[in-house]
Amino acid sequence: MTEQELKKYWYAAYAAALSMLRHPETVTPKEISSGVRACGSGVFNRLFCLAVWQEVQLQKAGKPSIPPEQYKNAVADVWMIFKNYGDGDGSESYWDRLVEELCRVMKQYQRCPLIINLVIHVTLEAIEDIQQKKQAMSKKSKEKKMRKENARICEETMQETYIICVSPDWVRDTQVFDTDSLPEGIDPDTVDIYDETYDPLWYDAREPLFVRTVQAHDEEEASRIVADAKKYPMKCLYAFRP
């Protein structure tokens, strides 16, 4: 039974158990089985088949473990333990407080069989079951996160830096201004490079045209990344490691 199912049926289960304790003359094995089926197996099996059925037998024998008028308070006290501690954080202080509360309730009812069953074999076991499942889920979540992180690190470590260029064989009318050929003393930043005077300083670019650097596993992947981002044809690009 999941934690959600356990919490869903817990209050109804204790209410049914209290009703049986108040009316032991109507309780039969069939009634006990009906209570288990209504709430589910596991901890509720122990609630009805152990705690309730044992106390009903003691009542029918005229030897109830506590006065019948205390059943309501006893069941309510145990229910409050589950309500307050059923969804704890599992810390050491949480368990210390829980054990202290369990001992207080058992002492209050002179550690009678009914209370021992309700506190130890039903409530405590249910809370331990919830905590174990929460820890298991937390562990799985951490393991999943760790696997994803390891995969990411592995992915990154396998990648290398590539320089992506456009081959000049696939470019037309691309020229570069030769700043090194300017007369001495002329600042390139102050020159109108489009003035006809400087036309001779323009030459066709034959060097690769740099586009960008990327992280990739191989040359083809690097070129594809740039082609997709810049909308360049793959055929015009080539990549190399620096």
Image (spheres, rainbow, N blue to C red):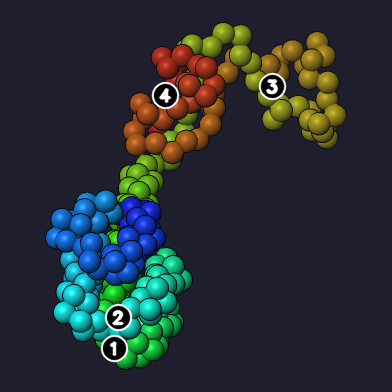
Give neighbour class at mark 4: few <14, some 14-19, many 20+ (Cα, 10 Å).
many
* 33 left or right of 120 in image: left
* 85 left or right of 117 in image: right
From the image, which quarter does the N terminus lie in? Answer: bottom left
Which tag is nearer the camera, tag 1 or tag 4? 1
- Labels 1 and 3: the sequence-earlier one: 1
**Residue under pointer 1:** 111
Q: Secondary structure at mark 2?
A: helix
Whether the residues at callouts 4 and 2 have beta carbons within 8 Å, the answer is no
The single residue placed furthest to the top in the displayed view is 172
Give the residue displayed 37% in from the left and 29% down from the top.
Answer: 221
- Labels 1 and 4: the sequence-earlier one: 1
Residue 30 horizontal/vertical position (percent): 15, 56
Give the residue displayed 32% in from the left and 69% down from the top.
Answer: 22
The residues tagged by marks 4 and 3 sit, at their Cα atoms, a distance apart of 30 Å
The residues tagged by marks 4 and 2 sit, at their Cα atoms, a distance apart of 71 Å
Amino acid, disc 2: Ile
Whether the residues at callouts 1 and 2 have beta carbons within 8 Å, the answer is yes
Residue 229 horizontal/vertical position (percent): 52, 24
Which tag is nearer the camera, tag 4 or tag 2? 2
Taking depth in this image into account, of 70 and 114 the one nearest to the observer is 70
Give neighbour class at mark 2: few <14, some 14-19, many 20+ (Cα, 10 Å).
many
Taking depth in this image into account, of 120 and 96 the one nearest to the observer is 120
Q: Secondary structure at mark 1?
A: loop
**Residue under pointer 4:** 224
**Residue under pointer 3:** 177
Count of residue discs? 4
**Residue under pointer 2:** 115
Amino acid, disc 3: Phe
Asked which quadrant contains residue 137, the reply is: bottom left
